[in-house]
Image (spheres, coloured by chain):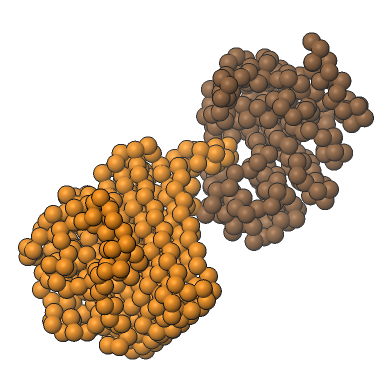
Amino acid sequence: MSLLADKTQQTQSVSQGSHTDSAAAFVPDQSRAERTTSYAVSDFPVPSGREEEWRFTPVDRLQALFAETSGTPLRREESLPEGVTVSTLSKDEWQGSGAPKPADRAAVIAAAQAEAITVLDVPAEAELTEPVRLVLTGEGALAHGHTLVRVGNFAKATIVLRHEGDAQYSELLTVVAGDGSDVTVVTVQEWADSALHLGQHDVVVGRDAKVRHIAVTLGGGIVRLNTNASYAGPGGSFEGLGVYFADAGQHQEHRLFVDHEAPHCHSNVEYKGALQGETAHTVWVGDVLIRAAAEGTDTYELNRNLILTDGARADSVPNLEIETGEIAGAGHASATGRFDDQQLFYLQARGIDEDTARRLVVRGFFASIVGRIGVPEVEEHLMEAIDRELEATA
Amino acid sequence: MSTVESSTLEIRDLHVTVETEQGTKEILRGVTLTINSGETHAIMGPNGSGKSTLAYSIAGHPKYTITSGTVTLNGEDVLEMSVDERARAGLFLAMQYPVEVPGVTVSNFLRTAKTAIDGEAPKLRTWVKDLKQSMSDLKMDAAVAERGVNEGFSGGEKKRHEILQMELLKPKIAILDETDSGLDVDALRIVSEGVNRAKESTGAGVLLITHYTRILRYIKPDFVHVFVDGKIAEEGGPELADRLEAEGYDRFQSANATS
């Protein structure tokens, strides 16, 4: 699979001599590209919480997902439009394919413990009129999952993954979008409050392909999704959209890494979140790397957080690394704000009661993303879910 | 307008404070004013005299504390009402700096407000027709209806949008807080005509707060009140506005300085 460039793992041989630190045990990566990826569990020590990529995460509650223990797969219900097939791939076949490798402890455990790789194939040039729907339900146990979505050249497909129930779940999801394909992947996290979910989603954008990855996180005790996009050829476009709503006690973390290696590719990342209640915590990290060869790149990333009550915390970290000046555009924006009482006053001064006014403002805050999901069943469900979240505190 | 019953907004000896970094500051120091349906009252005064504080206090903005005095609408205690209850009772405040509410479309906002004020959803066909007509009268682009509330609006668009709301929500008493500020002559005329139309069709009482006399060429006041240092310093008919135009506020401010 030539389209899956093998990013050879690098060590920090350059940085080690040049930087002395009292806590010399840990040397930060000089570039996002240097982050380890591997199938060997031993390459990833159990995180302590001091590592750059784990520093926001309550790792002490995730020990089950860092252990080399086998679990039971989530219950899977699927609805497949005509032409779409499901099969399995052995780990050996997978590891020889050049697909993106696990990039952290949880992902490498998921790759090692998942029984096999579930493969969803959308044939070349198929134009699906209905989404592929997968509902994954946890039954309170430890679970590991590994899914590959392969969309053939020039095909058009929407895949909706829904996560429900209770589980300690670690997963790898790889989406390989063929040349000229148009793919939308929606992942909805509506777990029970106690669920833990660590995911690594790799999206490989084919030449001139257009891929949208949409994360909707509403439920779960800890949800942490790492979404990595890379390009197999020029002209590709990646859009990462996200909507999250964290209540008291919830930790929701979305990390994105867009790796621009091919020229003339486009990426746009836009995540919006609302937080309410004591200890509600959200984390958004948006890394973009524009490599020397990626001339003509156009990229933008944005994160906005709306804090509805005291005691909630939103971390937002955009990072942009540029190795060539020959780009079309690169930018990012991040803002976290409290609920604006002036907006509330304005709406109430027009006769609208406070609860309705709050709902309008929060719906309005999310509208710019929700309206672009383009999957009506997801959009409607999401707006209803947001209303319910707000009612819970009203 | 024959169906409109007469309304009265009565403000009696109103004292209002605001918290500042220097401590509590009294802004209104005993304002007494009565506005009846169909009347237009102009409140004029220099910057910092408390004109806007009066407007926001009547509307119920939480920043202001009423320390004494009363405000009633047809005998009902306005100060006991929440902000939205005041609006539903028939008060309207056109704001000097209308607030942006991103992502909430103008059409959704107006329909929600209309439903709240009337207690029932407007009939869709007449509503759409009324909205289009009012927007066209105010020379507003129809596409504005699908934009976010005040989102990226120019100063003139924001003011037209305020008056559009006055026309559609049909308040009993409308307070217009410096609706003329920042408008060029054409926009001022369009907005003023909108106010006159709304007043004509609803018989509303209007409290027009302004720094300049310019808008009074388009909206004729029945009464003019000069506001200085948190209270009314002088009252009269339209001729008082003419005198202010000629003489400015110096007379009042120097009198205040020596007292």
Which residue sits at x=40%, y=78%? A261
What quarter of the picture does the C terminus of chain A occupy?
Answer: top left
Q: Quadrant of residue B205?
A: top right
Tally of numbered tags: 0
Can the viewer see residue A343 in this picture? Answer: yes
**Residue A391 position within the rendered picture, expressed as x and y whole percent measured from the top left:** 36, 43
Instruction: Say if A97 sits above or below A318 in the image.
Output: below
Q: Quadrant of residue A16?
A: bottom left
Image side of residue A213 versus residue B220, left or right = left
Instruction: Say if B226 sits above or below A150 in the image.
Output: above
**Residue A289 position within the rendered picture, expressed as x and y whole percent measured from the top left:** 40, 69
Which residue sits at x=21%, y=58%? A197
Q: Nearer the viewer, residue A12 or A34?
A: A12
What quarter of the picture does the N terminus of chain A occupy?
Answer: bottom left
Image side of residue A110 versus residue B35, left or right = left
- Chain B on-screen colour: brown
Q: Quadrant of residue A165?
A: bottom left
Instruction: Say if A59 sits above or below B175 in the image.
Output: below
Can the viewer see residue A190 in this picture? Answer: no
Q: Residue furthest left?
A: A69
Chain letter, orange? A
Q: Nearer the viewer, residue B146 or B210?
A: B210
**Residue A369 position within the rendered picture, expressed as x and y whole percent measured from the top left:** 45, 61
Which residue sits at x=13%, y=79%? A91
Q: Nearer the viewer, residue A244 or A329?
A: A329
Q: Residue furthest top?
A: B259
Image side of residue B28 versus residue A116, left or right = right
**Residue A393 position within the rendered picture, expressed as x and y whole percent measured from the top left:** 35, 40
Instruction: Say if A342 sits above or below B55 in the image.
Output: below
